[in-house]
């Protein structure tokens, strides 16, 4: 077997492993919220439960087929990669030998692609993340002067585009006219949701900064418009923003960013959200267990999303052993390759 074909089959293995293992986290958040609303104790977050049926199989298989087609000189492999049949919940027997990481937490691609090209928080970045097999991508939502929702991390346009000024003080037309170094334009929220739906990817939307009631109304309306309620996680730093989303759309999963040292306060207050996104330095195994006992799941960021606090692989190993439910990282493809070689039960 040629070296090129072996590499392609390795890519296929990693992509299919990510699909089988990292479907949307179904069931837990809705059950947890229902028990809270009923006045009873919240159900513990199902540890290491991975849902299936997100419609992403065809997408991953198409990526594998595209990779194979690039090696036209290679013979057709005798063991084709099968798509999951309708209603099938078990892993296809033809890929069981590559499905080794049955307990690894799924990665969330931070800003789609937060380093190099394509530029972060662009449609190209989101499609890139999906093409690499990431089951989730994350983006930041800001509102323009005239009320449009756009994907942009910074308040200022200067760092990632050729224009200047604050997003909230510019019109949608001005913001959309900006260009990134690779020639893309900041996308509207509707474009972000369309890409997620078309690629079968889940998306985390972080509201920046503190949103008004009208802005939250727009966000919820767009999520429903694209039928993405079950594949979206809405996050924020402000508790009141999460409460507004919960009141308007209880079925939408929510998550809260917070500063280190607030875990005990978080639990004591009886928080209404489903996920908690703490700082890397504040994460411990016991704190994750405490969150799980209260029906809260943990999205764990890598430290500064790079190798500054030990190797990324060491960070990922520790977070998985401790029981993190998702890993927020700038290196989602690298994580998928790493996770495909390990089992962390």
Image: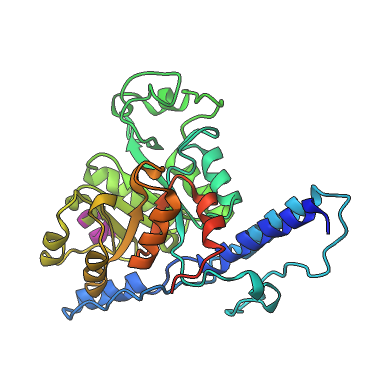
Which quarter of the figure is the C terminus placed in?
A: bottom left
Magenta range is: 243-248
Residue 100: where, in percent of width, then height? 57, 71
* Image x and y of residue 119, in percent: 50, 33
Residue 225 part of the magenta segment: no
245 falls in the magenta region:
yes
Q: Residue at x 59, y 65 (%)?
A: 17
Q: Nearer the viewer, residue 186 or 283?
A: 283
193 or 338: nearer the eye?
Answer: 338
Relative vertical location of residue 331 with respect to residue 47 in this rendering, above or below: above
Residue at (18% x, 79% y) in the render: 41
Look at the image and tell me whether residue 41 can be seen.
yes
Q: Residue at x 33, y 24 (%)?
A: 170
The image shows residue 111, relative to residue 106, as above or below, that is: above
Q: Is residue 177 above or below residue 317?
A: above
Q: Main secondary structure of the magenta part?
A: helix
Residue shown at 20% from the left, 74% from the top: 37
- Residue 279 visible from this viewpoint: no
- In the picture, residue 44 is in which quadrant? bottom left
Quadrant holding the N terminus = bottom right
Figure disc tally: 0
Rendered view: 23 above or below 232:
below
């Amino acid at each position: 077997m040629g070296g090129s074909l072996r590499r392609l089959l390795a890519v296929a293995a990693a992509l299919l492993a990510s699909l089988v293992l990292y479907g949307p986290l179904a069931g837990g958040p809705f059950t947890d919220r229902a028990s809270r609303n009923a006045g009873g104790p919240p159900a513990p977050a199902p540890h290491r439960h991975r849902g299936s049926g997100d419609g992403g199989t065809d997408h991953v298989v198409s990526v594998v087929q595209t990779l194979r087609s690039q090696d036209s000189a290679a013979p057709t492999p005798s063991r084709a990669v099968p798509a999951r049949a309708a209603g099938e919940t078990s892993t296809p027997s033809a890929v069981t030998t590559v499905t080794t990481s049955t307990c690894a937490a799924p990665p969330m691609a931070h800003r789609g692609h937060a380093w190099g090209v394509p530029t972060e928080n662009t449609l190209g970045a989101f499609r890139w993340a999906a093409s690499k097999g990431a089951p989730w991508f994350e983006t930041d939502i800001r509102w323009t002067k005239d009320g449009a929702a756009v994907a942009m991390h910074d308040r200022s346009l200067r760092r990632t585009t050729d224009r200047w000024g604050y997003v909230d003080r510019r019109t949608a037309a001005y913001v959309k006219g900006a260009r990134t170094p690779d020639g893309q334009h900041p996308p509207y929220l509707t474009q972000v949701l369309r890409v997620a739906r078309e690629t079968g990817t889940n998306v985390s939307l972080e509201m920046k900064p503190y949103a008004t009631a009208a802005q939250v109304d727009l966000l919820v309306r767009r999520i429903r418009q694209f039928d993405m309620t079950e594949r979206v996680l809405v996050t924020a730093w402000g508790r009141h923003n999460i409460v507004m989303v919960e009141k308007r759309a209880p079925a939408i999963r929510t998550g809260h960013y917070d500063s280190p040292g607030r875990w005990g306060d978080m639990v004591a207050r009886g928080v209404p959200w489903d996920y908690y996104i703490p700082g890397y330095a504040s994460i411990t195994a016991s704190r994750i267990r405490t969150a799980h006992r209260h029906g809260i799941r943990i999205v764990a960021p890598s430290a500064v999303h790079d190798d500054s606090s030990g190797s990324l692989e060491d960070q990922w190993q520790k977070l998985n052993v401790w029981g993190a439910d998702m890993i927020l990282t700038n290196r989602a493809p690298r994580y998928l390759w790493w996770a495909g070689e390990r089992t962390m039960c």
